[in-house]
Amino acid sequence: MTTLSDVAVPAALVEALRDAGPVLICGHARPDGDSLGSVMAMAIALRRLGRPVRTLCSDPAPAPFLVFPHMDTLEITREVDAAGATVIVMESSALGRTGVAGFEQANAILNIDHHLGNTAYGTVNWFDEGAAACVEMVADAIDALGVPWDADIATYLYLGLLTDTGGFRHSHISARSFELARRCVLAGADPVHIGQVAYDSFSLGRVRLIGELLHGMRLEAGGRLAVLTLTPDVHVRAGSSPDETEGLINMPFTAQEIRAVCLLRNDEDGVTRVSLRSKGLIDVRAVAQEFGGGGHKNASGFTVAESLEAVEARLLPLVLDALR
Ligand code: 5GP
Ligand code: MN
């Protein structure tokens, strides 16, 4: 079987995946399509090999994703007894990004990620920064195990690929991404259905939230930077909930002149969560790192225990610098 990747699946990883013992698979907190897709595709493949698998997440999946197969097997928990198990962590640059405590007790941790700056917390660490989505790596791992893709595996691989590339548009997308998409469709993934679930299955409250957010949008740097702020009162006005904000940061980008977007949220008292996006060479990962966060050059984030106003005052000069 030819590998889709430039970075070979490590032999130690394949060996650890082939082992017979119990497995816990977890992605990052507030799961997105790539995190869930990576977790679920790997879970289905390992169950096919007869391994006992539990899938975990610190937060519930976005509600529309519950239509996908086996989603009822995803356990929502913030603590687990991992003693005696192998843990597979997807898409998490540090173990804390899982939002689940207890993985330190595991027999082994297999760390699979496509972000720059992963802290290499695993027993086996496998990084491929050239992958447009973590599912590109998971697809190679499943191939290395010799598990044929069924429609369920293909559905999750396609979900991760579609969402992490922003609908096949973001950087890192390559011929490899389209080869994966092709194989997913051949194996039974339905791109129309998955696309509708990912992009056209939101609540009416979220549609109103788009209006509220864009109404409050501020422009800086001569109109090249858009700043969005999201406070609980905005959700009240829109009739939306804080777990419905995925993807909203991209709205200002549909204007050609916008080169970077900051979205600042304070869902909890005294905690501010920031998402940063940019186009082209503008590096917002470096900005996020100044606040202890990370991600990719064009998509990064961080969370700090400071007021939204205080974070914004420190953040904007750094983003304006990055725009120069
Ligand atoms: P989002 O804005 O969608 O939450 O995150 C965008 C990107 O930044 C993702 O690749 C995500 O992994 C990364 N990211 C977001 N928050 C953090 C954080 O607190 N730490 C690190 N290392 N990466 C983050
Ligand atoms: Mn990803």
Image (spheres, rainbow, N blue to C red):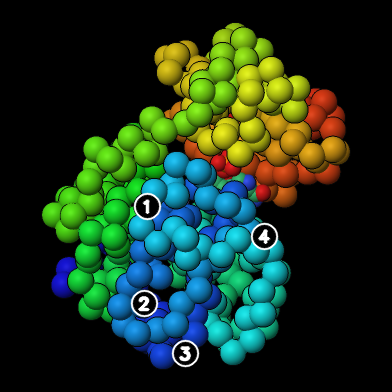
Circles 2 and 3, Cβ within 8 Å, touching? The answer is: no
Neighbor class of circle 4 (other Cα within 10 Å; few <14, some 14-19, many 20+) is some
Residue 110 lies, in percent from the top left, at: 50, 75
Q: Answer with mark 1 or mark 3, whichever residue precedes in sequence.
A: 3
Return the mark for residue 21.
3
Viewer-proximal residue among 242 and 104: 242
* Distance (Cα) linking label 4 and label 2: 23 Å
What residue do we see at 61% from left, 72% from top? 121
State the image quarter where residue 269 is shown. top right
* Distance (Cα) linking label 1 and label 3: 26 Å
Return the mark for residue 46.
2
* Distance (Cα) linking label 1 and label 2: 18 Å
Residue 208 lies, in percent from the top left, at: 56, 17
Neighbor class of circle 1 (other Cα within 10 Å; few <14, some 14-19, many 20+) is some
**Residue type at the position of mark 4:** Gly
Pair 1/3: label in front: 1
* Distance (Cα) linking label 1 and label 4: 23 Å
**Residue type at the position of mark 1:** Phe
Residue 145 lies, in percent from the top left, at: 28, 79
**Residue type at the position of mark 2:** Leu
State the image quarter where residue 154 is shown. bottom left
Q: Secondary structure at mark 3?
A: loop
Q: Answer with mark 2 or mark 3, whichever residue precedes in sequence.
A: 3
The residue beneath circle 4 is 99
Circles 4 and 2, Cβ within 8 Å, touching? The answer is: no
What residue do we see at 44% from left, 49% from top? 66
What residue do we see at 22% from left, 64% from top? 150
Pair 1/2: label in front: 1
The residue beneath circle 1 is 68
Residue 75 lies, in percent from the top left, at: 56, 64
Q: Answer with mark 1 or mark 4, whichever residue precedes in sequence.
A: 1
Return the mark for residue 263.
none
